[in-house]
Amino acid sequence: MLLKKIKLGICDDNKEFVGIMVDYLSSKENIEIVGVANDGNQAVKLIQDNDLDLLILDIIMPYLDGIGVLEKVNELKKKKT
């Protein structure tokens, strides 16, 4: 039986943590890491540019924190409709 891979984005400014997460999650056959962001602005772009199933989002990041990222994405989504 062929399962659909989970499309995952990782957003965190701690590059060591991101590296560990990427190494670990890349070894899972049902997970596809679509992209990585190291600050809030990159996180918004990652979310906009990809159809993610799951997002690991840090709360404290440069430029725009995790809550700000969610607010910005919600704002952009409202503008599209």
Image (spheres, rainbow, N blue to C red):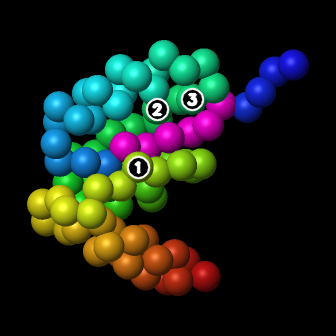
Q: Pinpoint residue 5: horizontal percent, then vertical percent.
A: 65, 31
- The residue that mark 1 highlights is 56
The residue that mark 3 highlights is: 31
In the image, residue 34 lies at what x, y percent?
A: 46, 36
Residue stretch rendered in magenta on the structure: 5-10
Which numbered tag is attached to residue 9?
A: none
Q: Inspect the image, locate mark 2, and give the three-letter code of the amino acid beneath it.
A: Ile
Asked if residue 45 can be seen in this view, the reply is no
Label whose residue precedes the other's in the sequence (2 or 1): 2
Where on the picture, by quarter, is residue 43?
A: bottom left
Would residue 40 appear left or right of 28 to someone viewing this image?
left
Q: Which residue is mark 2?
A: 33
Quick one: 40 or 61, which is closer to the camera?
A: 61
**Label 2: which secondary element:** strand
In what element is the residue under mark 1? Answer: strand
Cα distance in 3D space between marks 3 and 2? 6 Å
Amino acid carrying label 1: it is Ile
Residues under labels 2 and 1: Cα distance? 11 Å
Quarter the C terminus occupies: bottom right
> Where's residue 12, x and y in %?
25, 48
Decide: is 64 above or below 81. Answer: above
Q: Residue at x 19, y 62 (%)?
A: 60
Pointer 3 or 1: first along the chain: 3
Taking the spot 81% from the left edge, 21% from the top edge, the residue there is 2
User: Is residue 55 shown above or below 81?
Assistant: above
Residue drawn at x 43%, y 81% as measured from the top left:
75
Magenta span main SS? strand
- Looking at the image, do the residues carrying marks 3 and 2 touch, with CB atoms under 8 Å apart? yes
Question: Is 9 contained in the magenta span?
Answer: yes
**Would you call the spot at circle 1 few (<14 residues within 10 Å), some (14-19), or many (20 or more)?**
some
Instruction: Give the residue displayed 29% in from the left and 26% down from the top.
Output: 20
